[in-house]
Image (cartoon, helix red, strand yellow):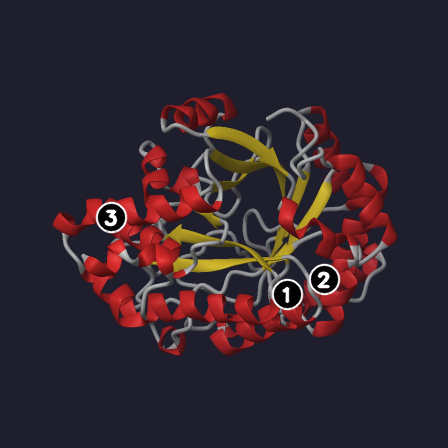
Amino acid sequence: MAELEAAGTGTISREAACRFLRSGDEMLPSLLAAAQRLRDRFKPGIVTYSRKVFIPLTNLCRDYCGYCTFRRDPGQPGAHTMTPDEVMEVVRAGERLGCTEALFSLGDKPELLFPEMRDALHRLGYKSTLQYLEAMCEQVLRESSLLPHPNPGLMSAEWLQRLARVSPSMGLMLETTSSRLLQENAAHDNAPDKDPEKRLRVIEDAGRQKIPFTTGILIGIGETAEGRVDALLAIRDLHEKYGHIQEVIIQNFRAKPATPMANWPEPDRVEMLQTLAVARLLMPEMNLQAPPNLSDPHYADLLDGGINDWGGVSPLTPDYINPERPWPHLEELRKRTEAKGFELKQRLPVYPEFMAQAAAHSDRLAQRLDLARDPEGYARRAA
């Protein structure tokens, strides 16, 4: 308990963090109170979200994660690579609804495994999925008021640099630092791009280039308490070294039918709140996010864990990664946030304090950010 009282004067130790994750219900109120104190000191009275459209550029993927229903093989029902016209149709519809973010999600380098994807890219005039993504981010930036935020998986330092010229922020979930989950029948069996070392390398390369970056962990996929803490510490260490991680997502695993992990137990409310609170105690001045749709109908309770952001929420498109979990309506999100004592503010895909980092990568980005932000750096449109 003394460690919780002192948490405001410095971050807690790894040992304490692991102990807090294993603590019972009786300690939860004190743990949450400590996290809330730190959150309120960091960004008092405000919880943010990004109004977005979700663009699944392609759902072909060479990885086979045990929990994923997004990915497809060529020829499977629902397998699809969007055309530029399809992308821009979604973007323009989102524009009419006040969206400011175009979130690009896609499978990791499907052309390396599937000749069908290579053929599709050739017909579109591109040699790789990343090249096609770059072109679509550039078109969104040129032809709309939305700002791209790509999540393309593993990429080289060169591709990070190229994408940073056409998107103010980008993301890659670390998920875990446990290589054990790459073993046979584990969550990342047959998913070579989920190697933690490779993912940490991308996050570090982004840091070297001062690219505003979103990352996070996925809890409940077979990691231990120590593994969960180690993943948070790895993220914290990279941010302390480079100062580029704009937000950390704490995402809870949700079991999906017809996947290898369909019968895997999901983290319960206490486990999620404990993890959020420990993340806040480890990173007192980090934007912490938890997706509301993965904790519905009780998502407002996540604020008790010390988060200050809801992430991207769309008034138009579904969560293609978790299609069975619809976004909350924005007015309902506002009401629940205000009932907890916070003002809900719409942000851009890049946070206000990372705006200068983003603008430094291209003149076009700098101009677009100036047009999109209000004097405080939030979205110019009303929330």
Asked whether the beta carbons under mark 1 and mark 2 sit within 8 Å of each other, the answer is: yes
Q: Residue at x 39, y 42 (%)?
A: 294
What mark, if any, has residue 341 been given in the picture?
none
Q: Nearer the viewer, residue 240 or 222?
A: 240
- Give the residue type at disc 1: Pro
**Residue tagged 1:** 110
**Residue tagged 3:** 268
User: Considering only vertical position in the picture, is 65 above or below 195?
Assistant: above
The percent position of residue 171, horizontal first and vertical second, equals 60, 57
Report the Cα–Cα distance between label 1 and label 2.
8 Å
What mark, if any, has residue 129 been given in the picture?
2
In the picture, residue 238 is in which quadrant?
bottom right
On the picture, is 341 further left or further right than 380? left
Report the Cα–Cα distance between label 3 and label 2.
37 Å
Secondary structure category for the residue under label 1: helix
Q: Residue at x 80, y 36 (%)?
A: 371
On the picture, is 182 further left or further right than 60? left
- Give the residue type at disc 3: Asp
Q: Earlier in the sequence, mark 1 or mark 3?
A: 1
Q: Nearer the viewer, residue 144 or 131?
A: 144
Q: Earlier in the sequence, mark 3 or mark 2?
A: 2
The percent position of residue 188, horizontal first and vertical second, equals 42, 69
